[in-house]
Amino acid sequence: MSCTILSSPLQGFTDYRFRNAHEKWMGGVDTYYAPYIRLQGHLDIKKSYMRDLLPVNNSVRQLIPQVMTNSAEEFLFVAAFVQGLGYQELNWNLGCPYPMVTRRGLGSGLLKHTGKIDDLLRRVSDESEITVSLKLRLGYDDSHEILNLLPVLEKHKIKNLIIHPDWESNFIKEKSIWIHFNNVLKIPVILSPIMATSTQ
């Protein structure tokens, strides 16, 4: 049986130096996801983001940039930037659970706002040729929220959903409800596993 190995990003750690070292000494990863780009309200790409994504700095098989935003203008700006570097796909981070992110309506803090997600995806589809994939959780307050979001996502052309089977309010506290994945079949799904100790 064959499988595809994906490496998820960890902000501040898995930059191009980590990815290149891992590829050289460990290998086995088919696709790496870069840590997210966040614009902080200005349409300007920080030099650190540029360095991390420059093709000349990356010696991995495939690299997919990621963006964290709740603004269509920011998404389109980042999409144009990464396309200019030769990338064809942009992953949208709707999964980050940290309060400093979610209280700004970013990451998993945006999951409840299906209308905003719908509007952003519609604009991106109308105004850009970028391929879009999503990283998300089952929800913010509870694991049923994804069921409200799925009909919205299914209206748009999305390459895949990378789902962490947990919800923000339950972050690292309890096991998730796996049965919901039976409802996520129209869009290809990649499951991001929960890491646990032998005592959990």
Image (cartoon, rainbow, N blue to C red):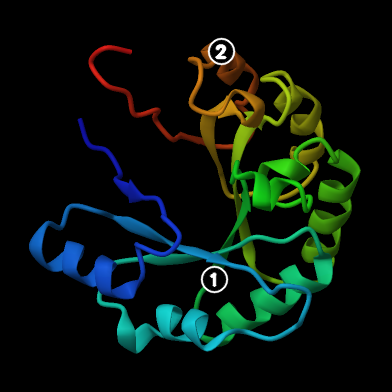
Q: Give the residue displayed 39% in from the left and 67% down from the top.
A: 63
Of badges 1 and 2, the one in the foreground is: 2
Question: SS of the residue at dot 1?
Answer: loop
Mark linked to residue 88: 1
In the displayed structure, would residue 80 be above or below residue 124? below
Q: Amino acid at mark 1?
A: Gln
Q: Give the residue displayed 26% in from the left and 67% down from the top.
A: 18
* Relative to 58, 147 lies left or right: right
Q: Amino acid at mark 2?
A: Ile
Quadrant (top left/top right/bottom left/bottom right) for the N terminus: top left
Q: Give the residue displayed 73% in from the left and 68% down from the top.
A: 75
- Tell me if residue 60 can be seen: no
* Residue 142 percent location from the top left of the image: 70, 20
Mark linked to residue 177: 2
Mark 1 → mark 2, Cα distance in angstroms = 33 Å
* Residue 50 percent location from the top left of the image: 49, 85
Question: SS of the residue at dot 2?
Answer: loop
User: Foreground residue, 152 or 114?
Assistant: 114
Quadrant (top left/top right/bottom left/bottom right) for the C terminus: top left
Q: Give the residue displayed 78% in from the left and 53% down from the top.
A: 104
